[in-house]
Image (spheres, grey):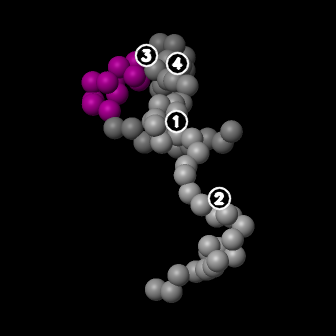
């Protein structure tokens, strides 16, 4: 997995505390920030798409020949004229 650069704005007091704590533990500030993010996201299992979609999940209703009918497929995949 690659590395992604994020920029974070911190109040002066928090930045100073981060710096002191990093020095005391012999770590970089980035190490401590990563540790903190890992702690708050540890139980995050991602989005529950089923809960988000809810009743819209499942097979929809429509014509049975939608993918095989040449008439219904007419123009599908062609660029629109703008």
Nearer mark to the viewer, of 4 and 2: 2
First of labels 4, 2 by sequence position: 4
Q: Quadrant of residue 75?
A: bottom right
Nearer mark to the viewer, of 4 and 1: 1
The residue carrying mark 4 is 43
Residue 51 screen position, x and y as percent: 47, 31
Magenta: main secondary structure = helix
Nearer mark to the viewer, of 3 and 4: 4
The residue carrying mark 2 is 64
First of labels 2, 1 by sequence position: 1
Give the SS element for disc 4: loop
Residue at screen point 68% across, 39% down: 1
First of labels 3, 1 by sequence position: 3
Magenta segment range? Answer: 10-20
Name the mark on residue 21. Answer: 3
Residue at screen point 46% across, 37% down: 55
CA gap, disc 2 and disc 1: 27 Å
CA gap, disc 3 and disc 1: 39 Å
The residue carrying mark 1 is 49
């Amino acid at each position: 997995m690659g590395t992604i650069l994020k920029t974070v704005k911190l109040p002066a007091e928090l930045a100073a505390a981060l710096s002191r704590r990093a020095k005391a533990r012999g770590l970089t500030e980035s190490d401590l920030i990563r540790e903190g993010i890992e702690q708050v996201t540890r139980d995050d299992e991602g989005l529950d798409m089923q809960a988000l979609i809810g009743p819209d999940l499942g097979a929809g209703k429509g014509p049975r020949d939608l993918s095989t009918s040449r008439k219904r497929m007419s123009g599908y995949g062609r660029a629109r004229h703008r």
